[in-house]
Amino acid sequence: MARRATTAKRKKAAPKKSNRKKTAPTKKSGGIGRLMLGGAFVAGTLSAIIAVGSMLELDRASDEFGRAADQTAPDYSLAEPEPAPMLRKDYKLSENTPVRGRTGYLVGGNVGNAQASTAQTGVQEQPDFIAPPQSKPPVVAGNILPGDSGIDKPVGMSTSPADPNVPWRKYAALTPDTGRKPVIAIVIDDAGLDQPRTARTVKLPGPITISYLPYARDLQPQVNAARSAGHEIMLHMPMEPSSASVDPGPHALLSSYDRQTILNEMTWMLDRFDGYVGVNNHMGSKFTSDPERMHIVMEVMKSRGLMFLDSRTSAASVGYETANRFGVPAITRDIFIDDADDAEKIADMLRRTERVAAKQGYAIAIGHPRDLTLAALHKWIPEILAKGFVLVPITDVLRRASQHATG
């Protein structure tokens, strides 16, 4: 019997094995690390921006304070009761003018002509050029010709700039040992007019630098007291501000003056007292921006062996630049402490002074003999000394800046 053929059952094909290995699921590695790194980068960038912004703000604020200070005349009512200072147009050398020692000299070319002029008018005319003295000038008409005291050789001519007898070295205050610590020079302007507050300034821990207005009274005794206390002295020379409504005081240098008038006024101011290291400008935003007039000023600074501190009452000042061209030792201020007579703002300016000194190794801060300023400095000076800063006279900062510039 025949059988029906049956179809053979097909075997299911085994699944093909893949040669590729299964990859383990990837972990998100470093997510937190990247986040932290990004945060640190952002924080660093913000810190850099803040630091740059802070320095730019400091420069802007300093210039604003300079301009504001330039428009603020000292309060003459604070002075001791005394006759009003003589105006420029009324100025003559009095026959009873006391003989004083003079810092440096301003020497003309023809002493004979000067003697003749003095004999005729009673007023000694200054020549309109500066030259080294041939010998010690004689006393004429009961007064002293410029150059009778101070140094006997002009700086940069027959005297080495390192000569210890040039006034900016000769009258420099002693500097404490500073090592590598950052230093701060405090300059108090407008001194001498308000004698009680000037006397309180002299009692500040020092050394500080005190800059006296030339039209104050009893200048030499005030200066002697300050030097005896270990402070350094400057002459605060009034110069024309940009505002015509502000009076810089008697004998101020004006941009409208010719060469001879500038020399005459400078001679009167520079011969008012002795023992100062140099000059800084009182106001002067207009005058210090005039290259031709500042050229004359620096001739005199060079001749007398004086330094120049540019108070920088204007961003357009050419004082520092002109001094450098003449080889006059010069420096510029960094901070105005008390443009605003406000305790909190004064404290903020003192903190800024610390930051500048920490950054560049030194700082120059200018203030005035006011109650809030003097109280703040009495408190602040011991604090900065405890922080490792050193208080120095202006000539020490000048030497440091000069060494830094020359390498």
Image: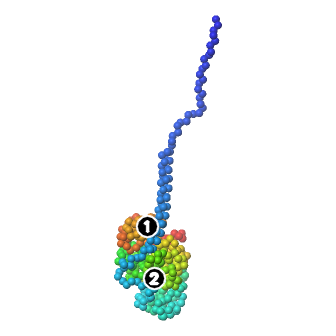
Q: Which numbered disc flags the more N-terminal residue, 2 or 1?
A: 2
Q: Residue at the spot x=40%, y=69% of the render?
A: 340
On the image, the x and y values in percent for residue 401 come to 50, 70
Q: Quadrant of the N terminus?
A: top right
The amino acid type of the residue labelled 2 equals His
On the image, the x and y values in percent for residue 126 come to 50, 87
Residue at the farthest right position: 2
* Residue 104 seen anywhere in this rendered image of the structure: no
Badge 2 element = loop
Q: Given contact means CB atoms under 8 Å apart, are the residues at marks 2 and 1 in contact? A: no
Q: What is the basis of the colouring in this image?
A: rainbow
Q: Residue at the spot x=49%, y=85% of the render?
A: 264
Between residues 258 and 184, which one lies in front from this camera angle?
Answer: 258
On the image, the x and y values in percent for residue 94 come to 42, 89
Q: Is residue 38 above or below residue 242?
A: above
The amino acid type of the residue labelled 1 equals Thr
* Cα gap from disc 2 to disc 1, whole angstroms: 32 Å
Tag of residue 147? none
Q: Report which residue position mark 1 lands on.
A: 353
Q: Residue at the spot x=54%, y=82% of the render?
A: 158
Between residues 329 and 134, which one lies in front from this camera angle?
Answer: 329
Q: Report which residue position mark 2 lands on.
A: 251
Q: Residues within 10 Å of mark 1 (few under 14, many from 20)?
A: many
Q: Residues within 10 Å of mark 2 (few under 14, many from 20)?
A: many
Res 227 → quadrant: bottom left
Q: Residue at the spot x=44%, y=71% of the render?
A: 68
Q: Is residue 41 above or below residue 322?
A: above
